Image (tube, helix red, strand yellow):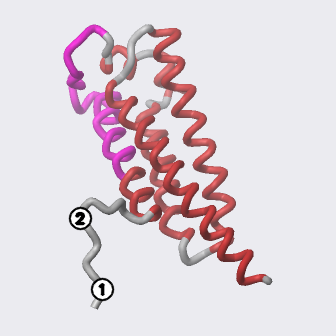
Amino acid sequence: MSPPKPATALPAPRAAAIVACGVALASLAPVALHQLGVVAHLPDPPGGLFDSDGITESKAAHPFRVPDGLLGLASYAATMALLLMARSQPRVRPLLATKLAADTGLAGINMVRQIVQLRRICSWCTVTALATAMTAYTARQLLRSAAAAALRNSQ
């Protein structure tokens, strides 16, 4: 009988990527609701660094006059679908890798824009960016191990 795994063990990369993508989705929902006028105020941590209301109401947060919270929800829903399909459908993995690179790049650009142009940050958007980085990191491990297994099987 093998000993049980310690409770502090890190989750498998696939599970961690799915959870991190779920966190990104969850952090975008209040932003989208605020941008649609359903929620009047997005609470922020104390301090002068944060201005989630101002940032999510800015012109930059409405590309093509569409709230970026809605665009983000659609984008991360697609990422979640790719994460879920990647295990059983190996042909999806290159698309997932490309999507994760795009997600990570856009989240990074958004954070830099907030800091450089607006001189404030959206706390909700920061959670999304951190969750995006975690999704990309853990999925990268997943994709790397899948590619190694495919290479072994082809030899």
Q: Residue at x 72, y 79 (%)?
A: 152
Is residue 141 highlighted in magenta? no
Q: Please identify, in this view, whether the residue under mark 2 or under mark 1 is nearer the observer.
A: 1
Q: Which residue is mark 2?
A: 7
Location of residue 88 by image quarter: bottom right
Q: Position of residue 110 (x, y in %)?
A: 52, 25
Quarter of the image containing the N terminus? bottom left
Tell me where residue 113 appears, x and y as whole percent.
53, 17
Kind of residue at badge 2: Ala
Left or right of 146 on screen, residue 127: left
Write the residue at 43% across / 16% down: 58
- Give yes or no for residue 41 being in the magenta stretch: yes
Find disc 1 in the rendering and name its residue. Answer: 2
Q: Quadrant of the C terminus?
A: bottom right
Residue located 53% across and 20% down the image: 112
Q: CA distance from mark 2 to mark 1?
A: 15 Å
Q: What residue is rendered at 60% in x and 35% in y?
A: 105
Question: Which sits earlier in the primary sequence, circle 2 or circle 1?
Answer: 1
- The span shown in magenta is 22-48
Residue type at mark 1 is: Ser
